[in-house]
Amino acid sequence: MNRKMVFDIPEEIIHILDILNKNGFSAYIVGGCVRDILLGQTPKDWDITTDAKPEDVKRFFPRVFETGINHGTVTAVINDTNYEITTFRTSTYEETSTLTEDLSLRDFTINAIAYHPQEGIIDPFSGISDLEKSTIRAVGNPHDRFEEDPLRMLRAVRFSSTLGFKIDDSVLSSIKENCSKIEKVSVERIRDELSKILTSDRPEEFVTLRETGLLKHILPEFDICFDITQNHPYHIYNVAMHTLRTVSSIEKNTALRWTMLLHDTGKAVTKTTDNKGIDHFYGHQKKSMDIAKRVLERYKFDNATTQKILILIKYHDMRINPDNKSVRKAVSKMGEDIFPDLLKVQKADKSGQNPEYFDEGTAILNKIQEIYLDIKKNNQCLTIKDLAINGDDLLAMGFEQGRDMGVVLKMLLNAVLENPELNTKEKLMELADDLENSFYK
Ligand code: ATP
Ligand code: MG
C-alpha cells in the first residue's frame, strides 16, 4: 500500500487539522475512520488525535462542547456535524505524550493507524498488513491489553463479526484465558458491543463468544442453549444454533435481533422427552419471556424496548389462522403497532427450523400479512377506541362508570372482532341492551 496515498476526507476535517497545525500543534485522523477508508468504506464518525490539550482546542473553535473532558475529548461542531478531538492518549501520569504512544494504547493494530494529508499514513504497528490479511491482532501483548480493559476481548469478536475478519490465534487464546474478567466491565459497554454483533452481517459470531468462554460470563442464559438438543420433526438444530439462524434471518434492527436471540431461552428449562423419544418444550414462551426480562433489565435496556421485546417473545409461537377473524383477533390482542413485527419474528423463526416445512409455513404467514394489510386498508375496528359506541353512550343508557363499563366495552369489541358488520351505533346499542339485561338480572 502506498503510504503517501491521498485520502478523500471532508473539508471540515482538513480545516480542523489546519487550525491545529497553524497554532503549532500536531493533529491526525485516527482509529475507526482510517481503518474504514483503507477498507474502502465510508466512516460513520471521525476521530482526531492531537497533542493540543482540551483547553487549547476549546480556544480554536467557536462551537465546542466537552463530551469526555476526563478522557481529553472535546467535540467541535462544524456545519452541524460533530467532530471529536482527543488529546494523545497517555499510559502514565506524564503530562505529554506522542502519536506513537497514543497508537500503542489502542486495542487492535487495524485501529491503530493515523493519517495526515501531508504526512500520509502512520502505521507503527503494521495495521495495514493486518488489514490486508483480514486479521484482528492486539497492539502489543494481548494478555496485558485485556487485563487493562477486558472489554477489548468483546470488541475483538465484534470486529470479527462486523468486518468478517479472523481473530489471530494469540488473541483467541488470550481471550480464553482471561474471559472471566469481562465481568468487571460495565453492563452498558457490554450491551452496546453485543448489540453491534447482533446487528452485524455475521451474528453467528456468537459461536466465537461461546468457544472463547465469554458467553457464559455475559449471557449464561443463552450459553446453555448450545447444550439443548431438539429431537422433533420441526427441528434439526440445537436451540442455540436454531436461534442464531433466526437472528440472521430477521432485519438488522436492535430490538428484533435481541428478540430472536432470547425467544427460545426458556427451552433450556422446559425440555421433556416423551416415550417415543420426541422432545417437547411446553410453556417455553412464558419462561423465555421471564428470562428475557431478567437479561434486559440486567443490561439496562430502556422500558419501551424491553416491553416490545417481551411481547414479541410472549407471542412468538401464537397460532394465527389465515382467515379474517383470526387475524383481527390476533392484531387486537397484540396491538396494532407491534403486529407487523410479530409476523417478521414468526417468519424468521421458520427459517431456523426444518427447511422441509419452510415454504408451507412462510406461505401461511404471507397470507396473514395480506389479510392484515386489508384490515388496515379498510380501517376495520381493532380496539375499543374504534367502536362506533363510547363510554358516554353507555352512561346515557344507564350503565355505571367503572368496571361494568369496561367489561361491556370489551364484550362489544369481541363481538365486532367476530363480525365487523356489528360496528354501527345502533347495532351496538342493541347489543349493549341485551348485555345489560343479562348483567342485572
Ligand atoms: P466503530 O466503527 O464502531 O465506530 P471504532 O473502531 O471507531 O469502531 P470506537 O469505539 O468508535 O471504535 O473507538 C474509536 C477508536 O478508539 C478505535 O478505533 C480504537 O483505536 C480506540 N479504542 C476504542 N475503544 C478502545 C478500547 N477499549 N481500548 C483501546 N482502544 C480503544
Ligand atoms: Mg468510531
Image: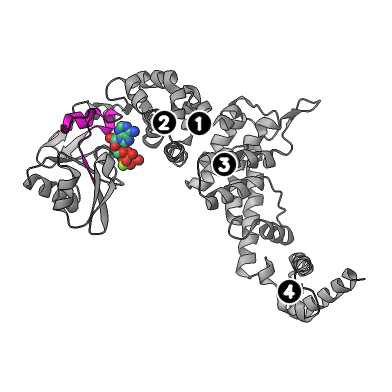
- Pointer 4 residue: 423
Q: How far apart are marks 1 and 3 (CA)?
A: 17 Å
**Quarter of the image where one finds residue 151:** top left
Q: Name the residue under label 3.
A: 260
| Nearer to us in this view, 69 or 102 | 69
Residue under label 1, please give it: 218
Q: Quadrant of ligand 2?
A: top left
At which x and y percent is residue 126?
22, 26
Q: Which percent across, then down, holds residue 230?
A: 67, 29
Q: In this view, does 211 lie to the left or right of 267?
A: left
Q: Distance between the residues labelled 2 and 3?
A: 20 Å
* Separation (CA) of disc 3 from disc 4: 37 Å
Q: Please, what is the three-letter code of the amino acid marked with disc 3?
A: Met
Q: Which amino acid does label 2 sit on?
A: Leu
The residue depicted at 13 percent of the width and 37 percent of the height is 120
Q: Which mark is residue 154?
A: 2
